[in-house]
Image (cartoon, grey):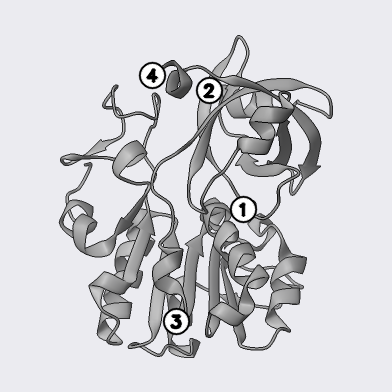
């Protein structure tokens, strides 16, 4: 149990500023043996511990083949994340993990992969994009749909532009509020479904973002003929222990930290409809 509960020391290799409020920490364990043994699956998360301040659950955005460093993209919104934003190369922090159930990538082999995200929900799903891009011959079409509140909130705009030029890849981006030079859609990400090249019988869908957006998107997908079993959601709750002990992340009879954070839509559908759960 100590292995699950005690943080291990890691070092910041680089802190990348993605926007005024979003940053990426590129990390490695100080213990080279531990670093060499470290394995994770896309969709899993680590608990990042800032000494004397606290810890927060953060998704891993790297691809598992990136064996030199592992990355976490974070929005500075609270005491711990604002403290993490101050770290620079050489600074140290604690890490527990990885935890949770990741994305169903074995089931996605040979299928079209549709990724729908809202806000910084793009971070947990970027690991899927990286995974598919590194193993492109194993998958069909890749459809990437990203929505943000304001055009200025979009991080990785250059990545989206680059992905949109690739074969068998469709990129659809929307902002509730655009800007003078905004090149994509102005409106909600769910407005983009009419333009998405969805093969309902061949697609597997992975979503992350506000729950209201995911509920609407799931309804639209089902209306297009996508089965519930092909729709997967990454849920967010207050995960404080990461091992199912504290109960803070409970949703119905499930714990997001151990039963998720990735759930099949069929197993979480009824819980999504309960306000405040």
Q: Position of residue 126 (x, y in %)?
A: 59, 59
User: Is 5 located above or below residue 232 in the figure?
Assistant: above
**Residue at the spot of label 4:** 1
Does label 3 or label 4 sit earlier along the sequence? Answer: 4
Find residue 72 and report its image quarter.
Answer: top right
Alpha carbon separation for disc pair 2 and 1: 23 Å
Does label 3 or label 1 sit earlier along the sequence? Answer: 1
Q: Nearer the viewer, residue 117 or 179?
A: 117
Q: Could you tell me if residue 188 is visible in this image?
A: no
Disc 2, disc 1: CB below 8 Å?
Answer: no
| Numbered mark located on residue 243 in the image | none
**Residue at the spot of label 2:** 55
Quarter of the image that includes the N terminus: top left
Q: Position of residue 169 (x, y in %)?
A: 61, 83
Does label 3 or label 2 sit earlier along the sequence? Answer: 2
Left or right: where 268 falls relative to 206: left
Q: Position of residue 252 (x, y in %)?
A: 17, 41
Q: Could you tell me if residue 181 is visible in this image?
A: yes
**Residue at the spot of label 3:** 111
Left or right: where 99 falls relative to 231: right
Residue at figure coordinates x 30%, y 81% from the top left: 226
Q: Position of residue 229 (x, y in %)?
A: 26, 71
Q: Nearer the viewer, residue 267 or 151?
A: 267
Does label 4 or label 2 sit earlier along the sequence? Answer: 4
Secondary structure category for the residue under label 3: loop
**Residue at the spot of label 1:** 64
Residue at figure coordinates x 65%, y 71% from the top left: 133
Alpha carbon separation for disc pair 3 and 1: 20 Å
Q: Nearer the viewer, mark 3 or mark 2?
A: 3
């Amino acid at each position: 149990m100590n292995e699950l509960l005690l943080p291990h020391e890691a070092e910041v290799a680089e802190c990348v500023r993605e926007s005024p409020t979003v940053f990426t920490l590129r990390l490695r364990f100080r213990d080279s043996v531990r670093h060499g043994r470290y394995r994770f699956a896309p969709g899993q998360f680590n608990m990042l511990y800032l000494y004397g301040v606290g810890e927060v659950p953060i998704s891993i955005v790297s691809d598992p083949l990136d064996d030199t460093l592992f990355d976490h993209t974070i929005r500075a919104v609270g005491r711990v994340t604002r403290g993490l934003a101050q770290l620079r190369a050489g600074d140290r922090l604690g890490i527990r993990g990885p935890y949770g159930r990741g994305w169903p990538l074995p089931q996605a082999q040979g299928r079209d992969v549709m990724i729908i995200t809202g806000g910084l929900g793009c971070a947990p799903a970027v690991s899927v994009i990286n995974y598919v891009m590194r193993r492109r011959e194993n998958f069909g079409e890749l459809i990437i749909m990203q929505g943000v509140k304001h055009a200025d909130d979009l991080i990785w705009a250059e990545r989206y532009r680059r992905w949109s030029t690739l074969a068998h890849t469709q990129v659809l981006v929307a902002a509730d509020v655009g800007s003078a030079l905004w090149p994509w859609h102005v409106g909600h990400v769910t407005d983009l479904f009419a333009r998405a090249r969805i093969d309902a019988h061949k697609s597997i869908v992975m979503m992350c973002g506000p729950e209201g957006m995911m509920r609407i998107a799931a309804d639209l997908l089902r209306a297009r003929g996508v089965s519930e079993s092909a729709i997967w959601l990454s849920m967010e709750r207050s995960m404080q222990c990461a091992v199912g002990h504290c109960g803070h992340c409970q949703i119905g009879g499930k714990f997001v930290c151990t039963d998720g954070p990735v759930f099949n839509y069929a197993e979480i559908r009824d819980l999504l409809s309960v306000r405040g759960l």
